[in-house]
Image (cartoon, rainbow, N blue to C red):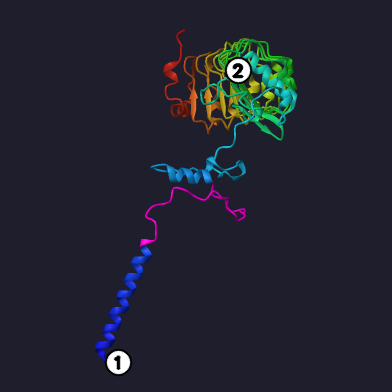
Amino acid sequence: MNTKNMLLCCLMGIALLLILGACAAEQIPATIPTQFPTSSVTSTPTETSIPFPTEAIHTLTSSPSPILDITQTLTPTQRPMDTPPPPFEPFVSCAEVEEIPVSECEALLALVKVTSGEIISPGGDRASWFHSNTPCNWSGIDCVEGHVHFLEIYSPTWVAPLPMEIGNFSYLQNLSLTGPIPGPIPPEIGKLARLEMMGIHDGVFTSIPPEIVNLNNLTFLLLANGQLSGCIPPELGNMNNLINLILYNNQFECSIPSELGNLEKLTLLDLHGNKLTGPIPAEIGNLQELRKLDLSENRLTGSIPTEIGNLTKMYDLYLTGNDLEGEIPTTIVNLEEVDFILLDDNRLSSTNPEVLEFLAEKAPRWAETQNIDQ
């Protein structure tokens, strides 16, 4: 075959291919068909495959701008992990609650009753109690192993004292209550044997129940901004595990009980803003773990005890606004770790060069704030 014939055969082959391609293109529809077979998918789905639902296909083909939402057609077990779980069952009664004992559930209901149902969440919104039959998911409540371990309640509408059912929380470790809680505090508070931290802010009760000394595991006790009056119970000195004792802004009178010197683990003692009288007890020097001592804004008299120098781990010492007088003890220079000393509005003095040098660094204005002429 000569060269001319070979070239002619090649051109004819190319033309034939073009014709076949055009014919094939004419048999392909230009659009997606609007009808799909109604027969179900015959293949068996595996754990990793979900049959494409007919409803989703209809949405895709009938909408001008289709938005495919497969999650609307899947069963709960097939929904993606980021889909919110179904809503909780609503609370009906404590008999329906399984995750905590009925007695603890009843105690929660009693607390709701004395607050008129007005419980505010830590975020400032009305707490969502009773939205489910799982109290451990309610605002301000944490549970461990089927018992309430943490309870935090703020309410501006306390209408009755704490209910006696408070003693039902036998596994409670942390109790925080805020609001105008009327008294008295029920003696059942002494049943919370596992309680480690207890804080009550803004209560209007006037006394500390003696049963509180039964809380042998308590390390943190705060009863502040309230109406507590009379004398600080000396029995508090028997609560040997206390690390923080905070009783500020109440109406306590009498003297500071010397028994508080037994609290050898104490790192914070805050009694400021009361009406305490008499001298600072020498036993305060036994609190050698103390980091902060605040006795300011009381009516304390006498001199600063020399035992103050035993508190060598002290960071903050606040004695402002009392009627303390006399020479500041030379032992105060032992407080080498202290950051702040406030002695304003007393009748203190010193002529000791070492004390003056120490106070010039720690309390520069102390001398000019004394009420020496009064």
Report the residue at 58% width, 50% height from top: 40
Which of the marked residues, 2 or 1, is nearer the chain's N terminus? Answer: 1
Kindly identify the residue that appears in the image at 42 percent across and 25 percent down.
Answer: 364
Q: Which residue is mark 1?
A: 1
Q: Is residue 341 left or right of residue 181?
A: left
| Residue 97 in view here | yes
Q: Residue at x 46, y 28 (%)?
A: 362
Q: Is residue 66 above or below residue 330?
A: below
Give residue 55's position: percent from left, percent from top. Answer: 52, 43
Look at mark 2 in the image and give the residue it sits on: 280
Looking at the rendered structure, the secondary structure element under dot 2 is loop
The mark closer to the camera, 2 or 1, is: 1
Mark 1 neighbour density, 10 Å: few (under 14) some (14–19) many (20 or more): few
Identify residue type, mark 1.
Met
**What residue span does the magenta drawing correspond to?**
26-53
Q: Disc 2 to disc 1, how far (Cα)? A: 127 Å
Q: Residue furthest top?
A: 374
* Amino acid type, mark 2: Ile
The verdict on residue 358 being magenta is no
